[in-house]
Amino acid sequence: MNIDAAAIRIARPCTDLTAAERFYVHGLGFDVLCRVTADGPGEHDLLMVGARRAAWHLEFVHAAAKPAPTPEDLLVLYLGGPVDDELITRLEESGGTVVRQSAYWDSWGVTVQDPDGYRLVLSTRTWSNRS
């Protein structure tokens, strides 16, 4: 087993797939990787988004009940530089809300809450697994 080469899927419940697409695709700039419409009992509508060449993606599964994320349910993107003001404007125009996260994250980026209440941190830092 080669865990180092594993692909990652982060799945989350979502009350409005159109709003999630507006935020993550039109606002953030991800691609729609897959869209499924339920056509039978026990199936769910879902939307997969991400960067086409990345080994990870987000899956939003339509849920009737509103998700209950906590302030610590974070998706952190390490940008390795300043967060573009135009990106923040697009995210807000796409249904996001800039929120204060913590002294640490507020000093190292911007946190934007998505339409379902999950938090996206756009970090100015870089990621290194050697730190």
Image (cartoon, rainbow, N blue to C red):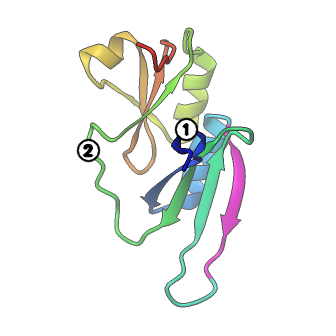
14 horizontally vs 47: left or right = left
Bounds of the magenta segment = 30-38
Which mark lies nearer to you, 1 or 2? 1
Q: Position of residue 6 (x, y in %)?
A: 57, 46
41 horizontally vs 35: left or right = left
- Amino acid bearing label 1: Asp
Q: Position of residue 46 (x, y in %)?
A: 58, 66
Q: Quadrant of the C terminus?
A: top left
- Amino acid bearing label 2: Thr
Q: Report the Cα–Cα distance between label 1 and label 2.
A: 29 Å
Considering the numbered disc 1 on the image, is that residue within a helix, a strand or a loop? helix
Residue at screen point 49% across, 85% down: 42
Q: Is residue 121 above or below residue 9?
A: above
Which residue is the site of mark 1? Answer: 4
Residue at screen point 26% across, 44% down: 70
> For residue 26, what is the image quadrant?
top right
Q: Is residue 57 above or below residue 85?
A: below
Magenta stretch: dominant secondary structure: strand
Q: Position of residue 69 (x, y in %)?
A: 30, 49
Numbered mark located on residue 68 in the image = none
